Amino acid sequence: MLKLYNTLSRSKEDFIPIIPGKVSMYSCGPTVYNYQHIGNFRTFFFEDILYRVLRYNGYKVKYVMNITDVGHLVSDQDEGEDKMEKSAKLLGRSVWELAEFYTGVFYRDRDLLNILPPDVYTKATDYIKEQIEMVKCLDDKGFTYKTSDGIYFDTSLLKDYGKLARLDIEGLQEGARIEFSAEKKNITDFALWKFSPENEKRQMEWESPWGKGFPGWHIECSAMSKAVLGNHFDIHCGGIDHVPIHHTNEIAQSEACNGEKFVNYWLHGEFLDMGNEKMSKSSGKFVTLQTLIDRGYSPMDYRYFLLTAHYKKKQKFSFDALDSAKNGYNNLKSRILAMKISSDGIRDATAQQREDLKKSFIEKINDDLNMPEAMSVIWETVKDSSLNSAEKLELIYDFDKVTGLGLEKLEKDSDNAEVPDEIIKLAESRAEAKAKKDFKTADEIRVKVREMGYEISDSKDGFDIKKL
Ligand code: AMP
Ligand code: ZN
């Protein structure tokens, strides 16, 4: 049984879809006013793992991700400029060109990280009509009011507003009294539709029953998920920062307009902590996938790094940590390549042994996507001395449908061929000798390998090989 941690209940729950065998899932995608940094990709990677785990469990998944190309203001609340318009002005390009360019880079990086595309991408500017309809629906039901700069949602009219984040509304209201805009009735109220400024021509603006303007950021996800998945669906995910504002407001809009429960399971990925590496987009200094490539890493080294942390825990990024992930991934690739050319015969494995490994892998991934432990099962399979290479590969290729490390397609190339197969085979026989406590043979092999120009050392995954 698949178990997922639901932010709504603050607990791990059995996953039961609305329609047996099918899953409807929505995640908040990129705002395409700039490059995505490697932190953003941690969230998209977590969503990719979720999508893969659902499919591995046999579900037919309809997965929707949006592309925000309008309406996301500099502050997640409703102040500041539109990120897209601001960036376009700075670069002297049109917002439309900008959106197309950064969406393209996002797709490229996604593919390089072997993140599967969703079944449907919804672009905010393609759904303006649906967003206006939803604002109209809220207007008709009396949830809105007008200020000098837009149409706002009155959050005090919903009894359970803030239930996802368990917001302390009174506390927020008290704390914010000083800078709290006079026109907003409650601190948590938010814009559904913003008017174009009177003396400024916006590049993106549309006619609406309330005047020319553009949609607020939150309404796009409520309107687009409704258009593609319906009023009520299974899973909604995103980064942890979306809990108190964006997702809270999506729930408010959807449940107020539709009059029914919006989403059953809310999943949130923790942040990548950049430590000393700055990652603020506004400062213009942040680490992208291209930064890693320029420094000699492969995008898949970064994917391997991401697999080493559970999505609900903060993960600290450093180049040292990335180096050890790269090392681990290289070791894994060397072992897989050696197995591919190995013709070792039948060993003493039983079908039970293979079943146990598979069962253990499924247990880990179905325990709220525990990928670090699922990776341990992959290493256990690599090191298992009762299975032959063909049997191990069959299992590992199957597991890699979830981990996405490209192990089946792996070919011997200049990048992977650092350690000759002969040396890997010797290192494997040494590991076997050690397992049988035949330390004399193990030492002899180590000396022989050293004479051939390589050093074997023990590691938590079995062994490391370095060229001398
Ligand atoms: P944005 O392009 O700003 O809309 O963000 C895209 C996604 O990245 C959202 O789901 C954010 O929650 C997520 N995100 C932003 N910063 C980080 C970070 N440092 N680590 C992980 N995810 C992040
Ligand atoms: Zn969203």
Image (cartoon, grey):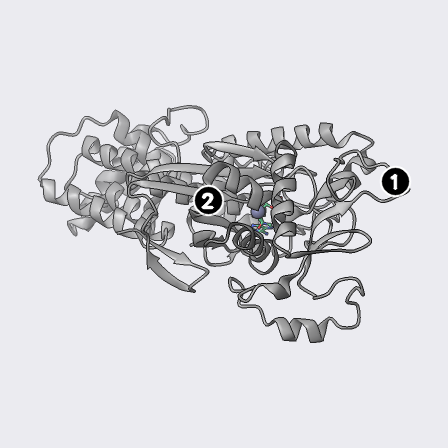
Q: Secondary structure at mark 2?
A: helix
- Amino acid on which the number 1 mark rests in the picture: Glu
Crowd class of label 1 (few under 14; some 14 to 19; many from 20; radius 10 Å): few
Quadrant location of the C terminus in the rendered image: top left
What residue does disc 1 label? 200
Do callouts 1 and 2 mark residues in contact (Cβ within 8 Å)? no
Q: Farthest residue to the front: give it.
A: 140
Of tags 1 and 2, which is closer to the observer? Answer: 1
Residue 33 on image: x %, y % = 70, 38
Seen in the image, is 71 located left or right of residue 13?
right
Q: Is residue 305 visible?
A: no
Q: Nearer the viewer, residue 136 or 73?
A: 136
Marks 1 and 2, the one that precedes in the sequence: 2
Residue 391 on image: x %, y % = 19, 34
Q: Which mark is residue 301?
A: none
Seen in the image, is 172 located left or right of residue 356?
right
What residue does disc 2 label? 47
Crowd class of label 2 (few under 14; some 14 to 19; many from 20; radius 10 Å): many
Seen in the image, is 450 located left or right of residue 381?
right
For the point 32% across and 45% down, the residue is 463
The image quadrant of residue 54 is top left
Q: Nearer the viewer, residue 251 or 359?
A: 251
Mark 2 lies within 8 Å of ligand 1 (Cβ measured): no
- Amino acid on which the number 2 mark rests in the picture: Glu
How much space separates mark 1 and mark 2, taking CA atoms? Answer: 39 Å
Q: Secondary structure at mark 1?
A: loop
For the point 63% across and 66% down, the residue is 156
For the point 56% across and 29% down, the residue is 108
